[in-house]
Amino acid sequence: MKTFPESIHSAINFAEFAQTTINNLPIRRKTKGTYHSMYRCHIHHALGGMDLREIKRSDIQELIVPLAAQTSAMTLAVIKSIFREAMAQALIENSPAHGVKGKAISVAPRRFLTWKEIEGSEFGPLTEHIHFLALHGLRWSEAVALNNEDIRDGRIYINKSIHGQTKSRAAIRTVPLLSRFVKFPKTPKPLRRVLDPYQVQIHSLRHTYAYLLKSSGVHVTTAQRLLGHSDPKMTLAIYTQVLDHEIDDSGIALKRWIESSRKIEKPSMCH
């Protein structure tokens, strides 16, 4: 990795250091592209012309404040990575990004179709593709990278995506084969077009799969492995999502329990 002058009298241009650092981070190509995009769109105009050593916590906080929650979180992650490298090279003693907080991220429940709704819907030539995603929980990037050699012995073996390696180590997994595999289009646009009228996204089909697992009584830790989540909180967030009919069903179940409990004969009194 390129290093920069260590003399306290030598200015270190933040823009040059940031670009070099991002280029050398041990991250996936797609993630690296996202980091460069975050830098160009949200960081460079505020910090690019400054001396690395002169940047203060207040400069970073001021940069983060106007950004949307998700964007501020990603932008801050990029800034922290840059200053971690500066500390590793002994260019600074402390990171000015330490203690800076972005906005709280509020994740709204993602709308999804139940399996019953999917079975009753018409997706034309892409019906089998939609069914495959809903019944196996693959990401589109994983499904498009599949070939016939990845499907054997009644299982799907997932170990790659269109970007190369899987999203994380947890994403390397096997899932039971429940429907026929048909080679996926090389672009997600056709799938998006057929799903748009139903107001759902391709990723929503992973929620369909998670809801199927939950409805079938599959334990959340097993579901985490089948979905390829590295963080169990992600699986729990889907498992705790409740559809309107489940609220009604719970009321019916409680009424039945109350009625049955009333029918239980009270123990006779001893005389």
Image (spheres, rainbow, N blue to C red):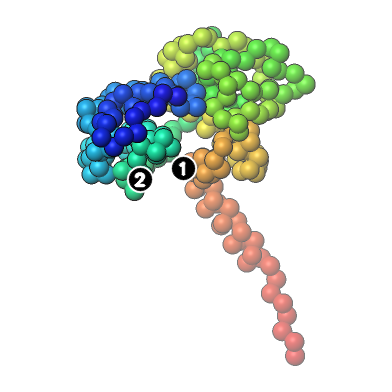
Q: CA distance from mark 1 to mark 2?
A: 50 Å
Task: Give the camera-side residue of 107 and 10.
Answer: 10
| 176, 244: nearer the viewer | 176
Mark 1 or 2, nearer chain start: 2
Say if residue 119 shows up in the picture: no
Q: Is residue 157 above or below residue 108?
A: above
Q: Nearer the viewer, residue 96 or 247?
A: 96
Query: Which residue is rendered at x = 63% and y = 36% of the image?
Result: 225
- Tell me the residue at 43%/37% (across/down): 88
Q: Is residue 138 left or right of residue 180?
A: left
Q: Amino acid at mark 2?
A: Asn
Q: Depth-wise, is mark 1 or mark 2 nearer the camera?
A: 2
Q: Position of residue 105 (x, y in %)?
A: 36, 42
Q: Residue at x 29, y 37 (%)?
A: 8
- Rendered image quadrant of residue 85: top left
Left or right: 220 as drawn, with respect to 205: right
Instruction: Residue 163 in the image: state x and y as whole percent.
Output: 52, 17
**Residue projecting furthest to the bottom:** 271
Quadrant containing the C terminus is bottom right
Determine whether the residue tagged by mark 1 lies in a helix, strand or loop: helix
Q: Could you tell me which quadrant the N terminus lies in?
A: top left
Mark identifier at residue 202: none
Whether residue 261 is visible to the viewer of this picture, yes or no, is yes
Going 36% across and 44% down the picture, which residue do you hit? 93
Secondary structure found at label 2: loop
Residue 165, placed above or below residue 46: above
The image position of residue 109, as x and y in percent, is 43, 38
Q: Which mark is residue 244?
A: 1
Q: Residue 179 is drawn in which quadrant?
A: top right
Read off the residue under disc 2: 94
| Amino acid under disc 1 | Asp
Of all residues, the one furthest to the right in this rendering is 153
